Image (cartoon, grey):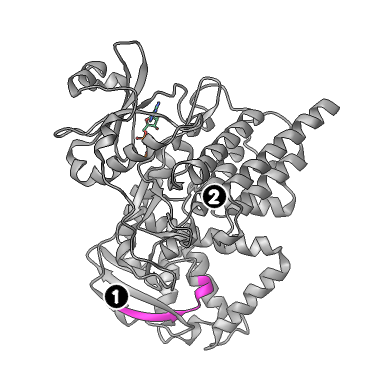
Amino acid sequence: SLCGSAPTLSTVCGFDHVAYSKSSDGYYLSINGQRMEDPVFICEVLESYFKSGCLLCDSQVESWRRIGEEYCNQDFTVPVGVKCNPNSVDLLRKAGRKILLQSSANASKLDQLTSKSQSLKEELDIKYSSASDSFSLAVPGMFLLCCAFMCPCFRAKRREAIEHNVLDRHLNSNSTSSVEVSSASERIPATPLRIPPSPSRFSLSPQLTRIGSVHLGINQIIKATRNFSPSLKLGEGGFGAVYRAVLPDGQVVAIKRAKQEQIPALRDEFSNEVELLAKVEHRNLVRLLGYTDKGNERIIITEYVPNGTLREHLDGHHGKILDFNQRLEIAIDVAHALTYLHLYAEKTIIHRDVKSSNILLTESYRAKVSDFGFARTGPTDTEQTHISTKVKGTAGYLDPEYLRTYQLTPKSDVFSFGILLIEIFSGRRPVELRREKDERITVRWAFKKYNEGNLRDILDPLMEEVIDEQVLGNILSLAFECVAPTRADRPDMKEVGEQLWEIRKEIGKSLRRA
Ligand SMILES: Nc1ncnc2c1ncn2[C@@H]1O[C@H](COP(=O)(O)OP(=O)(O)OP(=O)(O)O)[C@@H](O)[C@H]1O
């Protein structure tokens, strides 16, 4: 069978190091040390190999063809005139250049960006155990970095995993969960800039017991939440369940209780959230009021934000649909919150998990950024441009450069914000696997529409207003700047906030003129 012969399925076709390995859960492909898993682009890329002539050089071409047939349900016929090309890297590069000439520089950047972030997104969705035996093949990086293959023999199992992890997460549930790539810290990124993981995650200090304005013992918390009554449960995230509670003085708070079974593993996350929340005070950030770190309980008490999450509103779960101005105000609020974290908090704070389910809304539709479970303090030393750390965050919002290098900077939040901005105005989640193939990656789909001049197609169809195309264009081009594949090309959060503010001012002026 194909899988039986899989370890001999080796191709030399370029310069990237690609390992086809076996682990306890089946076969997988990794490129330059990165495990890859991408059901969306897999067939596109396979096709591109055939078209380039790359796979034709491979004695295993028949096996590859069978993968195409079985996995993609497609017959990858080789285009007439294409011959085995051992230098297909050049060929692919030329193809790349042609694309570059055809579209704007941004278009090509975005192409790389979306494909990379998508493949890595999938990688994040499924955690693997480490590989046992492996072999290598080399293929053109430009395409392969974007994508991955699957052996048909592990297809069924993989599909199950993908369906479970990705479809459930993105389609069947209303929230997108945060994940951690636990193997990341073990990998050596290909960068001379890498520094050892920073010990800057400071531990709980005695002063912290004095933080916040709410001091409750565990018994008082049990009373306030009616023994963590399911009827008071607001939701559940990676850290644990969140309850609404009324304190004896009438104050309404949110109580976040760590999952019992995960307390040892959550210790870092708990202290992280507490310490960071304790240091921030901004009207667009959820305020920490108190915490309990006793015995077998880890509990955080925060300000209660009464109007649900941004994602729920985009899904129409709260009845009224957010109008254009409300969406713009929400985007500005989030930009302000992140600017504060990056620039004005006691230390640079990188949120690392900016997403629509972490944006809570007040009754007047002002946004508050919550969930600091993954937040990290940024570089402390002015010489230092980044910190190196495990990759954490949520699939679809993750900065591809951070994924590749494990170097975290505030620009990773800028990337997530760009994805969020498109989500806010399109209503679409970053990844929607139930859509047509070319619409699944929202940022890619939006960029195509934008380039074709069909800006209005991007707008959330639930919004009934007619939006000025110039305004919409300005918002979208800002979002595309934020999601530039390299952080150097992204604006910082302060500039983003200022640009959004300008856009709002322009809207005000044109309304006055009308
Ligand atoms: N301060 C709050 N006020 C009101 N509701 C809240 C508050 N904090 C959280 N919630 C509700 O509880 C839910 C779970 O929140 P939590 O921050 O634990 O997880 P999440 O962001 O949905 O997921 P993950 O932990 O995977 O990022 C939220 O979706 C929201 O509905």
Numbered mark located on residue 414 in the image: 2
Q: Please say if 483 is above or below 214.
A: below
Q: Secondary structure at mark 1?
A: loop
Q: Is residue 429 left or right of residue 99?
A: left
List the residue tagged with mark 1: 1
Q: Please say if 190 is above or below 175.
A: below
Label 2 to label 1: alpha-carbon separation: 47 Å
Closer to us: 153 or 27: 27
Closer to us: 172 or 145: 145
Residue 311 is situated, as x and y percent measured from the top left of the image, at 49, 34
Q: Amino acid at mark 2?
A: Val
Going from N to C along the chain, the mark reached first, 2 or 1, is 1
Residue 117 is situated, as x and y percent measured from the top left of the image, at 49, 58
Q: Amino acid at mark 1?
A: Ser
Please report the bounds of the magenta region as a residue range. 135-143
Give the position of the C terminus as an image quadrant: top right
Q: Please say if 104 is above or below 435.
A: below
User: For the point 51% across and 42% down, which residue is it?
Assistant: 344
Q: Secondary structure at mark 2?
A: helix
Q: Confirm if mark 1 falls within 8 A of ligand 1.
A: no
| Circle 1 crowding by C-alpha within 10 Å: few under 14, some 14–19, many from 20 | few
Name the image quarter holding residue 509: top right
User: For the point 44% across and 37% down, which residue is it?
Assistant: 358
Q: Please say if 92 is above or below 262.
A: below
Give the position of the N terminus as an image quadrant: bottom left
Q: Is residue 361 left or right of residue 92?
A: left
